[in-house]
Image (tube, rainbow, N blue to C red):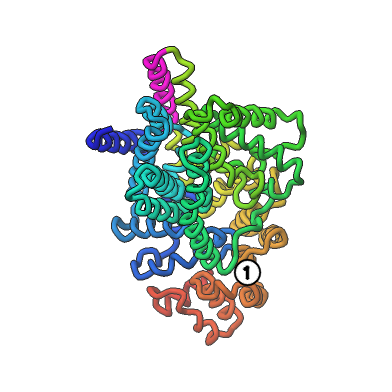
């Protein structure tokens, strides 16, 4: 493929990415985008040296503090510093990145299969797949896009190192450097060298002795990355599950149930990648229940789907074909979040299959090329598929437009999951729409009352309705289920609203030490001490606002 051809394909990939995802440019920040939007320090270039030694979300939450992706944080800082606060630039960058990923993918598949036709089929399918909407339309999911770009770049440089002996060391260095950047984007991509070098060994394009020598730079990089990861998370690795049963039920299952569920999850990912029916922004309790019986059809669908890909690996005639390449690519890249071994983190997320799905599209393209009688017919089939995929992708973009559209979509697609209901209720509460929030949180309580977020939001509704006794009972349930600082803060608010100022201040002093400098906590302390008659002590917290006069602050306290 000539240089000007590659440039044309780059422009086409980015252009069609905008055709598919251009409607997301009007979207707002939603859901976990607050990891970045609520961090004012990311608007200062002086903060860049610090992002390499801290978690992804520098907040008072142990779950969020267990993720290390500094390159993603750096890219978000770039958006803030160059383009400002509007979400438009964030969406535009994601769309461009998706186009770049597709371009690199097409070039790589052409090199691996030596077929421009297969490369274009696989790339077209990948570009338009509806399951990728979460990875592109959801700003925070940029880790999937960045990680994929550097993973593909690493593979390209590795192939250069194999093919060009005179400059082998230079390309191997570039490959290892790209691998390092992929890990800094997404920890799952530590698996990268196993995918790349393993394929080269098995397909006999690389002698084992040479492969071992070429593995050394990646091992050094992986060790260095793990050291940074350990430091960034405060001297630990995220090996324990910090999520509740409602968020990640498989972490609490015994081994037989875990294995059967993991097989079913594999079938879900493969099935929804190819046939995008029933896509959902949440799979938390109880949208995809654990598989507890061998007669569960989801388990056998997973067995069938995974067996097809395993066939592509074990069938000797496929060893040197794209069938093996695609199956190997998907299965290894999917393994870190398959839940067979590592059960921490989220339960299921469609964005995770972004990079592994490249293997599925290679498998699909090669299979079509082999099975269909002529390439014209195969091309026509792919055109029909990508038209359908494209239509569904554009439709699905609407899910990620606003927080309200996102949570409503969760309720529609996952009516048995508590999370769409509880997050929509919380959104309405933040907008002062108590009556609209109440039925949704009541529904969440009816589905799964033993979740701290459900009880906390229920307490908030009861507080707004001035049912203080019931609100206190609900927030205490939330604290007993999971003692988070946000719940203790809300408990203090309930006590203040109930006129129990001394008790409220005691909660602040005992449980909110890390949040004492926040404006909302300072204001609550000022209210408590003022109402207790200790005006001098209350004035120590009057710095909760830098814009109000002292008279306005007193008025705010007295009318609270």
The secondary structure type at the circle numbered 1 is: helix
Residue 323, position as x, y percentages in the image: 51, 28
Residue marked by disc 1? 492
Residue under the point 73% across and 30% down: 296
Q: Residue furthest bottom?
A: 536
Residue 224, position as x, y percentages in the image: 49, 63
Residue 33, position as x, y percentages in the image: 46, 53
* Main secondary structure type of the part rendered in magenta: helix
225 displayed left or right of 283: left
Whether residue 233 is visible:
yes
Residue 555, position as x, y percentages in the image: 47, 74
Residue 389 within the segment the image draws in magenta: yes
Residue under the point 33% across and 45% down: 92
Residue under the point 69% across and 43% down: 447
Few, some or many C-alpha atoms within 10 Å of disc 1 (few <14, some 14-19, many ≥20)? many
Query: In front: 113, or 48?
Result: 113
Q: Residue furthest left?
A: 4
Whether residue 80 is situated above or below residue 95 in the rendered picture: below
Q: Residue furthest top?
A: 373
Query: In front: 146, or 416?
Result: 146
Residue under the point 60% across and 37% down: 414
202 displayed left or right of 14: right
Q: Quadrant of residue 8?
A: top left
74 displayed left or right of 495: left
Whether residue 118 is situated above or below residue 432 in the rendered picture: above
Query: In front: 271, or 366?
Result: 366
Residue 295 within the segment the image draws in magenta: no
Which of the image's four quarters has the N terminus?
top left
Where does the magenta region start and end?
374-395
111 displayed left or right of 196: left
Whether residue 427 is visible:
no
């Amino acid at each position: 493929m000539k240089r000007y051809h590659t440039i044309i394909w780059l422009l086409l990939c980015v252009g069609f990415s905008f055709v598919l995802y251009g409607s997301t440019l009007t979207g707002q920040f939603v859901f976990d985008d607050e990891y970045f939007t609520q961090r004012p320090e990311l608007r200062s270039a002086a903060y860049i040296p610090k992002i390499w030694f801290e978690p992804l979300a520098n907040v008072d939450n142990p779950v969020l503090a267990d993720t290390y992706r500094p390159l993603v944080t750096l890219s978000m800082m770039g958006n803030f510093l160059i383009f400002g606060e509007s979400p438009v630039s964030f969406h535009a960058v994601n769309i461009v990145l998706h186009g770049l990923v597709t371009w690199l993918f097409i070039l790589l598949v052409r090199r691996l299969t030596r077929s421009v036709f297969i490369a274009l089929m696989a790339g077209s399918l990948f570009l338009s797949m509806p399951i990728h909407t979460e990875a592109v339309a959801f700003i925070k999911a940029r880790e999937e896009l960045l990680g994929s770009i550097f993973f593909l770049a690493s593979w390209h440089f590795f192939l250069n190192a194999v093919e060009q002996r005179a400059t082998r060391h230079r390309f191997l260095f570039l490959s290892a450097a790209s691998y390092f950047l992929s890990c800094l984007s997404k920890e799952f991509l530590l698996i990268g060298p196993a995918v790349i070098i393993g394929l080269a060994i098995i397909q006999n394009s690389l002698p084992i002795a040479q492969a071992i020598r070429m593995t050394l730079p990646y091992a050094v990089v992986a060790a260095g990355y793990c050291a940074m990861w350990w430091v960034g998370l405060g001297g630990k690795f995220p090996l324990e599950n910090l999520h509740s049963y409602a968020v990640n039920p498989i972490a609490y299952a015994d081994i037989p149930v875990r294995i059967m569920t993991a097989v079913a999850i594999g079938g879900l990912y493969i099935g929804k990648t190819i046939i995008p029916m029933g896509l959902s922004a949440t799979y938390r309790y109880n949208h995809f229940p654990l598989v507890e019986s061998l007669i569960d059809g989801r388990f056998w669908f997973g067995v069938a789907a995974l067996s097809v890909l395993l066939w592509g690996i074990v069938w000797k005639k496929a060893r040197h074909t794209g069938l093996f390449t695609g199956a190997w690519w998907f299965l290894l890249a999917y393994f870190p979040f398959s839940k067979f071994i590592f059960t921490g983190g989220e339960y299921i997320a469609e964005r995770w299959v972004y990079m592994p799905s490249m293997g599925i599209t290679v498998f699909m393209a090669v299979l079509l090329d082999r099975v269909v009688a002529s390439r014209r017919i195969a091309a026509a089939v792919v055109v029909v598929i990508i038209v359908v995929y494209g239509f569904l992708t554009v439709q699905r973009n609407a899910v990620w437009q606003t927080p309200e559209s996102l949570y409503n979509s969760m309720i529609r697609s996952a009516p048995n999951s508590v999370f769409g209901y509880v997050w929509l209720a919380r959104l309405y509460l933040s907008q002062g729409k108590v009556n609209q929030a109440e039925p949704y949180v009541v529904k969440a309580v009816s589905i799964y009352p033993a979740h701290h977020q459900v009880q906390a939001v229920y307490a908030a509704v009861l507080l707004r309705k001035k049912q203080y006794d019931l609100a206190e009972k609900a927030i205490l349930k939330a604290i007993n289920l999971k003692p988070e600082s946000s719940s203790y803060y809300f408990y203090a608010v309930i006590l203040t609203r109930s006129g129990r100022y001394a008790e409220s201040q005691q909660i602040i002093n005992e449980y909110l030490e890390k949040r004492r400098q926040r404006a909302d906590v300072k204001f609550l302390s000022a209210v408590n001490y003022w109402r207790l008659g200790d005006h001098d002590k209350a004035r120590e917290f009057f710095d909760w606002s830098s814009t109000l006069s002292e008279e306005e602050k007193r008025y705010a306290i007295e009318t609270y």
